[in-house]
Image: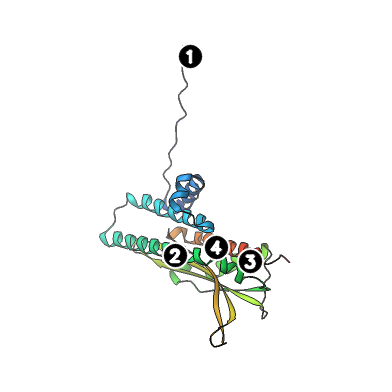
């Protein structure tokens, strides 16, 4: 009687917290097209990828912290960061979905884009997420995809803001906001003012060693802006 060969041994490797971003990537790739995951996250359109990564970050952060002995104040810090981020994600998704169609149209006939990147916190700079890193990466992304850059009167201002809050455990909550400001005429009094005509946000939590990975979230949102820009503007 022929014996059935034994299945190959499975090697389990315990990843350190600094490898959390790698675990998030693997899980996101595995569950991206899983029907149950798409049902759970819901019909959020272009927001799906960011919501998927955010969900994987929460799950992975919980696993990394599960076996660690934490003080009560540390547990409350994590709970506060998580609840605040989840609430912001829910509100951001509802407003963004309601504005998508109009916001894309507002990008039509923008001849140039003028990039502004806000300063980041001292904690974020010290952990490797610097303003210069964000500005260089976004500018390279815009140039690579053919978005015209300039400061003419027909330009729109592209603002990139990254806000962070460092908790007691070293876990960072982050909020990324990319918006376009244009000079518009207010119908009631015919005055001119700069207002946001397009915006998109991303929020989440990440370990201190992985804070520079937030750059990836920034570039994903910038990519969404570029897609919308070329939906109503012809490449030059």
The residue labelled by disc 3 is: 229
Residue drawn at x 53%, y 69% is: 199
Q: Position of residue 156 (x, y in %)?
A: 62, 75
Task: Give the CA distance from mark 4 to mark 3.
Answer: 12 Å
Q: Residues within 10 Å of mark 3 (few under 14, many from 20)?
A: many
Picture quarter containing residue 54?
A: bottom left
The residue labelled by disc 2 is: 174
The tag earlier along the polypeptide, 1 or 3, is 1
Task: Give the CA distance from mark 1 to mark 3.
Answer: 64 Å
Q: Nearer the viewer, residue 193 or 142?
A: 193
Residue drawn at x 45%, y 24% is: 6
Q: Is residue 177 left or right of residue 63?
A: right
Q: Position of residue 213 (x, y in %)?
A: 50, 59
The tag earlier along the polypeptide, 2 or 1, is 1
Picture quarter containing residue 182?
A: bottom right
The residue labelled by disc 4 is: 221
Task: Give the CA distance from mark 4 to mark 1.
Answer: 57 Å
């Amino acid at each position: 009687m022929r014996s059935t060969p034994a299945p190959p041994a499975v090697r389990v490797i315990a990843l350190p917290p600094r490898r959390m971003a790698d675990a998030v990537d693997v899980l996101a790739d595995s569950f991206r097209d899983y029907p149950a995951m798409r049902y759970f996250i819901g019909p959020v359109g272009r927001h799906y990828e960011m919501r998927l990564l955010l969900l994987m970050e929460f799950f992975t952060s919980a696993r990394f912290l599960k076996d660690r002995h934490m003080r009560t104040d540390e547990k409350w810090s994590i709970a506060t960061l998580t609840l605040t981020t989840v609430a912001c994600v829910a509100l951001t998704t509802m407003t963004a979905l309601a504005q998508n169609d109009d916001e894309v149209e507002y990008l039509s006939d923008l001849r140039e884009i003028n990039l502004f990147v806000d300063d980041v916190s001292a904690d974020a700079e010290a952990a490797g997420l610097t303003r210069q890193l964000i500005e260089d990466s976004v500018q390279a992304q815009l140039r690579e995809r053919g978005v015209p850059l300039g400061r003419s009167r027909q330009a729109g201002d592209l603002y990139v803001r990254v806000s962070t809050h460092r908790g007691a455990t070293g876990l960072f909550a982050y909020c990324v906001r990319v918006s376009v400001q244009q000079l518009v005429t207010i119908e009631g009094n015919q005055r001119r003012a700069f207002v946001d005509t397009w915006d998109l946000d991303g929020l989440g939590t990440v370990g201190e060693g992985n804070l520079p990975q937030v750059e990836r979230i920034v570039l994903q949102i910038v990519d969404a802006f570029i897609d919308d820009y070329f939906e109503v503007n012809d490449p030059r």
